[in-house]
Each structure stands twice: as C-alpha cells, then as structure tokens.
Image (cartoon, coloured by chain):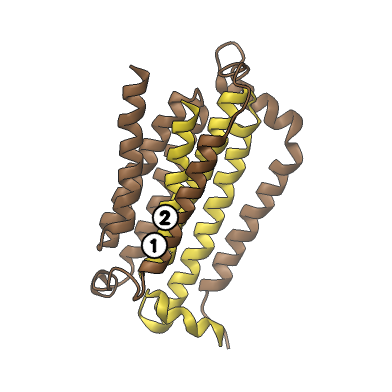
Chain colours: A yellow, B brown
Amino acid sequence: MLTEYLVVSALLIAIGATGVMIRRNFMIVLMSLEIMINGAGLFLITMSYYLGNVSGQVMFIFVAAVAASETAVGLAIAVMMYKRKKSVDVNDFSILRK
Amino acid sequence: MEGIMFYIISAITVGGALGVLLSKNPYRAAMWMIFSFFGIAGLFVMLHAQFNAMLQIIVYAGAIAVMIMLVMMIMDRRTIETLKRFNSQFYWPALIGLALFADLAFLAYKFKIDTSNAGKNLAINGSNTQMIGEVLFKHYLLPFEVTAIILLVALIGAVVLTKKDIS
C-alpha cells in the first residue's frame, strides 16, 4: 500500500505544479498551490504511519500554519492588484516588477 | 475492503485536483478544491491520523477555502470568469508537470523502507490527539512558538499590503 499512497501524493504535487504554471487566473494559481502543499502533507502522514513515528503528523500542523499564512499574503497581493488593474490575470502581474 | 476504500477516496482526491486544474470558472474550481480536501482527510483517517484529518477539514476546507471564496466575491464576476483558461504556450509547462509526475512515481516505486513498525506508536490509550500533544509540547515547542510568529507576520503583512495609502 505504501507505493499507492506515494503515487497519489506525487499526482497531487504534479497536478498542483502544472496548475501553477499553466493557469491564467491568479485565484486558481493559489488553489493549485494549496493542492501542492496537501500533496507534501500526504507524504508526511504516509511516512509517519509506515515508520511508526508521530513526528510527521506534528510537522503537518506546521505545514498547515505556513499554508494559511501564505494564502493570506497571496490574497492580499491579489486584492491589491485588483484595486489597481481591475484584473486577476497573471500576465498583468508583470507590473509588480517595475 | 481497505484497498477498495483507498481507490475510491484517492479517485475523489485526484479528481478534485484535476477539477481545479481544468475548470474555467474559479468558483467551481474552489468547490473542486474543497472536494479534494475532503478526499485527503479521508486518506488521513485511513492512515490513523484522526487529529490531522479534522485539522485538514477545519483549516483547509473551512478557513482557506472560505478566505479564497470571500476574496472572489468582492471582485467583479465578469472580470474573473471571462479569462482564458490557459496561458499561450501551455504545452511546455504541461510536459514539465508530466515529467515531474514520472520522476516522483519512479522514486515511489523504487522506495523501500522497513515497514515493520507500520501503524504503531501513533496513539496513547487509543488517542491520536494525546500522542500529538505529548510530542508537540515535549520535542517541538520552539518550532511551535516560531509558527505563532509566522502567523503574526503574515497577518501584519496582509494588513499593510491592502491598507489605503495615507498621504
């Protein structure tokens, strides 16, 4: 069963990475980031079960806290860009460079 | 029995993730994301991580999904629904994603560990929450405090980014 869990985790990470790279809507980019973080969390919990060590589950709590803060900051950037450009297209975000 | 349950739940999880990847409407994508999070919570229950399954539902399907939905509600519906689905030249990143999956799946098939301890040491007196509390507050107290500071910094950062300029 270990291999199947790892393959599901790999699928989540790959789908999330693809979503971050190919989608145009910044909201969906943020959602794909959450999917990626969840894939990593699934890996931690799987290892915690198969090694018989509860530390992986404790680390998932930290991962969840970091994911929540990352989403808050990302949404703040999205709101700021929406106020200035009335758009959430990632191609319009290149003005952040200037 | 457990194998059948695993395949059903992982189909829910991966299907939700594919829904986020492929749906044009961001509100529907958020619903698919919640679907996927519930699937992951089911996988956590199968891995004897009951506390983390509840944390997954409360933090991800509760807090983060609601935060993203609220931000989408203050925006104009037409500006975020009428965007094109993919970037131009989406095929190279899709190929990179496929290669990433092939790499990780190859590693998963080559991965061998000693699984003689599988399912042990995950609960005290049948309680997973108690075990996590023991380990968290005995061995991971400093990272726990640092996490509190990270949350505070993210809060201040979000407020500073979105406040009106006072000039």
Residue A62: percent from the left, percent from the top?
Answer: 61, 43
> What separation in Å lies between label 1 and label 2 (alpha carbons)?
6 Å
Q: Which quarter of the figure has residue B74?
A: bottom left
Q: Which quarter of the figure has residue B25?
A: bottom left
Q: As drawn, is B90 to the left or to the right of A53? A: left
Q: Are marks 1 and 2 in contact (CB under 8 Å)?
A: yes
Q: Is residue A86 above or below residue B127?
A: below
Q: Is residue B54 visible?
A: no
Q: Which residue is label 2 attached to?
A: B98
Label 1 is placed on what type of residue? Answer: Ala
Q: Is residue B159 visible?
A: yes
Q: As drawn, is A41 to the left or to the right of B117? A: left
Q: Secondary structure at mark 2?
A: helix
Q: Residue at x 54, y 51 (%)?
A: A67
Q: Is residue A59 above or below residue B112?
A: below
Q: Secondary structure at mark 1?
A: helix
Total numbered labels placed on residues in the image? 2
Q: Which residue is label 1 attached to?
A: B94
